[in-house]
Image (tube, rainbow, N blue to C red):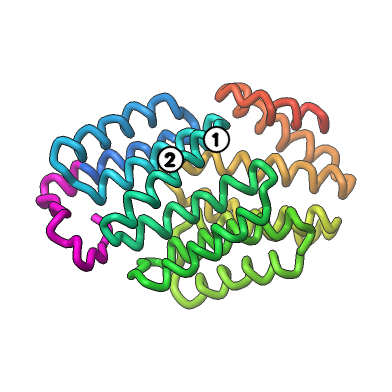
Amino acid sequence: MANTAFGQNELREKKPSKRDSLILADFKKKVSQSINANPDSALIYIKQFRKFSSQNNYLVSLTEADYLYAHYFRRIQKPDSALFYFEKQIDAAKKIDYFRGMAQGYNGLCRTYYLIGEIENSINAGNQALRYVQKIDDPGNFILADTRNALAIAYSRQNKMETAIAHLLAVDSLHKKQPIREDIIAAAYQSLGNIYLELKDYNAAETYYLKANREFEKIPGAGDFYFHTTNVFLGQVYYHKGQLEKADNILSKTLLFYEKIKDERTVAEINNYL
């Protein structure tokens, strides 16, 4: 279970037993492994996680259930519902002085606001997440690195590429000092690839996309989704570099993956290049 900082409300929180902690962790693992490729399955595990937390009055876990619901709604492209659950998590976390929950919630708001074009709200939420992450033990710099990744995307949407790159290079610097979880550092490399693709520096873009894929390949279960996401962009790089055979090969394989998971938006995007 995540560490907490409760202050005067400490007695309100019931700490899970070792057995219950393992049960909760297993639910979260199953959500993580299924949320991208099979969100309906993830929703089943989220409901089980919330029910178990509610039955045992695990207040921290209940805030985490809100976080998982928010991610589910982000995945199925219902941002208003995602924003509702991230706000709900923040409110619940504040009632028990659970700083990790506040950092997670603001991180989620940052990531969701930029999806709907509310960039200033995204940046404000990201900065709030950075504020609360300073108050917690953040193993592996997980929330810190992920928030910097999110802020980089927000700034890139404002065309503030230097600021975006600075956040991503800060993540790379953290990784060199202490290895960051594969999906987080890979996301930073993927974002750097996206920025350099937009700047038409195709060699730099290719370098970072390949670095991202090397990290994604290390992720059991969930890595395929992210790997193919990178390949959508990598195929575009090869197209712009005039390496049409490589572009056709990688995009054709990626198309089959997105047709299988019924991601119509990405299928249409790939078909534009084929």
In the displayed structure image, the side of residue 150 where residue 156 appears, left or right: right
Residue 204, x across and y down, in percent: 76, 62
Q: Amino acid at mark 2?
A: Tyr
Q: Which residue is mark 1?
A: 80
Mark 1 is surrounded, within 10 Å at the Cα level, by few (under 14), some (14 to 19) or many (20 or more) other residues, namely some
Is 259 drawn above or below residue 122 in the view shown?
above
Quadrant assignment for the C terminus:
top right
- Residue 74 appears in the rendering: yes
**Residue 158: in magenta span:** no
The mark found on residue 238 in the picture is: none
- Residue 188 appears in the rendering: no
Residue 144, x across and y down, in percent: 48, 66
Is 210 drawn above or below residue 115 in the view shown?
below
Residue 19, x across and y down, in percent: 11, 46
Q: Secondary structure at mark 2?
A: helix
Q: Quadrant of residue 202?
A: bottom right
Residue 268, x across and y down, in percent: 74, 26
In the displayed structure image, the side of residue 64 where residue 261 appears, left or right: right
Q: Amino acid at mark 1?
A: Asp
Q: Residue at x 55, y 65 (%)?
A: 127
* The magenta segment: 1-23
Residue lying at the far bottom in this picture: please name it: 177
Quadrant assignment for the N terminus:
bottom left
In the displayed structure image, the side of residue 191 where residue 4 appears, left or right: left
Q: Residue at x 52, y 39 (%)?
A: 224
Q: Residue at x 13, y 52 (%)?
A: 14
Which callout, 1 or 2, points at the residue further toward the start of the chain? Answer: 1
Nearer to me, 42 or 54: 54
Q: Which residue is mark 2?
A: 85
Mark 2 is surrounded, within 10 Å at the Cα level, by few (under 14), some (14 to 19) or many (20 or more) other residues, namely many
